[in-house]
Amino acid sequence: MLLSYSKIISLPVVDLQNRIKVGTVSDIIIDKNSLKVAALIVNAGNFFWPKKTYVCWPDIVHVLKEAVVVTDENSANDLTDLPKIGRLISEKCYGLNQTVETESGKNIGRVFDYLIDSLSGHLAKIYVKNIFNERIIPVTKIIEFTGRKFIIKNDKTAIKSKSSSEPVTVAE
């Protein structure tokens, strides 16, 4: 099942073993090499005592429309225990609003959402918009992700405008 970033954010994170809420998803960290979810940032505290914890992809049992299910309450870790996740955060490999450019440097727009395969955790598509239009870019067109920027192929086809079924030219 494909789920959008915007639908996953704010989902409750539930412990499968004890069937209790561990927290709420506040963001998604993407591994810049594999374009796969590396971890979820989870708000585990309350309004007066907020606490961020991190759930790595292998600890996630299911990502459903209603909740994210994790193996147990120990699935949520502090950042000090997860050096790779700390590096991805320092490289801004989370959230939205990344710039999207072609390999020749043409600015396409900014990411406003993306689709994630809920079974594998891989990105499937990114949704990009600029002042004039919105585009859906399949992950197969992505050459590189730096955290702040997606670089896509100089492909003249296969990138569809969200408002029509006609392919949109992304580079001359």
Image (cartoon, grey):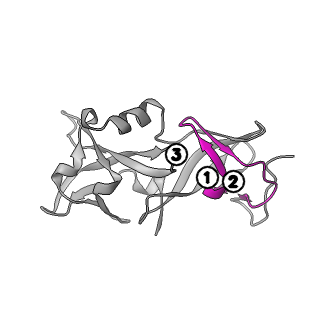
Residue at point 43%, 29% (across, down):
90
Q: Which mark is residue 33?
A: 3
Vertical placement of residue 166 versus 147, above or below: below
Q: Amino acid at mark 2?
A: Arg
Q: Residues within 10 Å of mark 3 (few under 14, many from 20)?
A: few
Labels 2 & 3 near each other (Cβ < 8 A) = no
Amino acid type, residue under disc 3 in the picture: Asn
Q: Which mark is residue 135?
A: 2
Q: Is residue 61 above or below residue 44?
A: below
Q: Is residue 30 visible?
A: yes
| Chain-order first, disc 2 or disc 3 | 3
- Residue in the picture at 30% in, 38% down: 82
Label 3 residue SS:
loop
* Residue 127, numbered circle: 1
| C-alpha distance separating marks 1 and 3 | 19 Å
Q: Secondary structure at mark 1?
A: strand
Q: Amino acid at mark 1?
A: Tyr
